[in-house]
Amino acid sequence: MILKSKAAVITGSTSGIGLAIAKALAREGADILLNGFGKPDEIEAIRSGIEAECGVRALYSGADMTKPSEIAAMMEEAEGAFGRIDVVVNNAGIQFVSPVEEFPPEKWDAIIAINLSSAFHTVHAAVPGMKARGFGRIVNVASAHSLVASPFKSAYVAAKHGIAGFTKSVALELATHGITANCISPGYVWTPLVESQIPDTMKARGLTKEQVIEDVLLKAQPTKEFVTVDQVAAIAVFLCSPAATQMTGANLSVDGGWTAQ
Ligand code: NAD
């Protein structure tokens, strides 16, 4: 168990990729703080289930990643409860699909806040403790859209390119402190985020659901298969392992060959 006696904060971990990463880190012995939205009873079942399965402490914070004060309070809660934050996984994210001239400005602001700025706020809060302990792992869940673009996703692509740059800058600053910062860049992973953008893409491009899946989503992915949440989580665990000590500032693609084209 590579994370025994360590503690991790995973944003947006009530669903999808974040939940898979939270479970994978807990299976490696980390105490975890879960975050994200959802039905209270379902979140409590997830939280208590992880504690029971993994024998770790699991907390939940409903902090809204658009609100810097709530992010700061969440980080303080984790540091106070666990006495440390060793791993920060910036995963919370939303999508909105629209032509740029119709893109609602409030959606632009929300995507930049959740998908990009929240990572600044968590890292800003966690780094002093990581430096003091001489150990830290910052894992940012970016996207193939941190490397290439698609039409109708201007805010998402801007935020994901932004987080790739933020990761590199932080990696350089922290390189001599035992702290690494890396991005994982998945292609299409079958999660609620992907499923929920299908209707808007159908509307924006005038396609059926099947056409969106085959001709838009998996068109970009040479393997013609969705990535699984567990495949992404395995990379996050690897980045926390001693084998990854010399990996920092990297952007790891797990995209079925998408960005090799
Ligand atoms: P998801 O919708 O299943 O999960 C998103 C999580 O973020 C949920 O827990 C949700 O409650 C939380 N969240 C949303 N808004 C929030 C807010 N304001 N404050 C706090 N939490 C909030 O999505 P997912 O597909 O698992 O996506 C997770 C990350 O992976 C995102 O950053 C996404 O951009 C990235 N990603 C996903 C794919 C994909 O194909 N699914 C591909 C590449 C990158």
Image: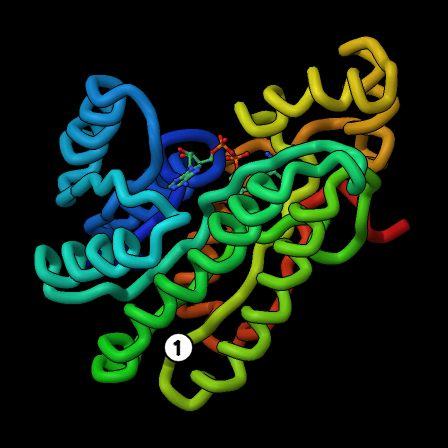
Vertical placement of residue 49 versus 127, above or below: above
> Where is mark 1, residue-wise?
179
User: Would you say residue 67 is visible in this rendering?
Assistant: yes
Disc 1 residue crowd, few under 14, some 14–19, many 20+, Cα 10 Å: many
Residue at point 61% right, 20% down?
195
Task: Give the residue at x 14% y 40%.
Answer: 55
Instruction: Identify the image quadrant of residue 162.
Output: bottom right
Q: Residue at x 36, y 59 (%)?
A: 88
Front position in the image: 173 or 199: 199
What is the residue that sits farthest to the right in this orientation?
261
Residue 230 in the image, given as x and y percentages of width and height: 50, 36
Q: Quadrant of residue 137?
A: bottom left
> Regarding mark 1 in the picture, which secondary structure is present there?
strand
Tell me which amino acid carries mark 1.
Ile
Q: Residue furthest bottom?
A: 176
Residue 117 coordinates in the image, percent (x, y) = 48, 59
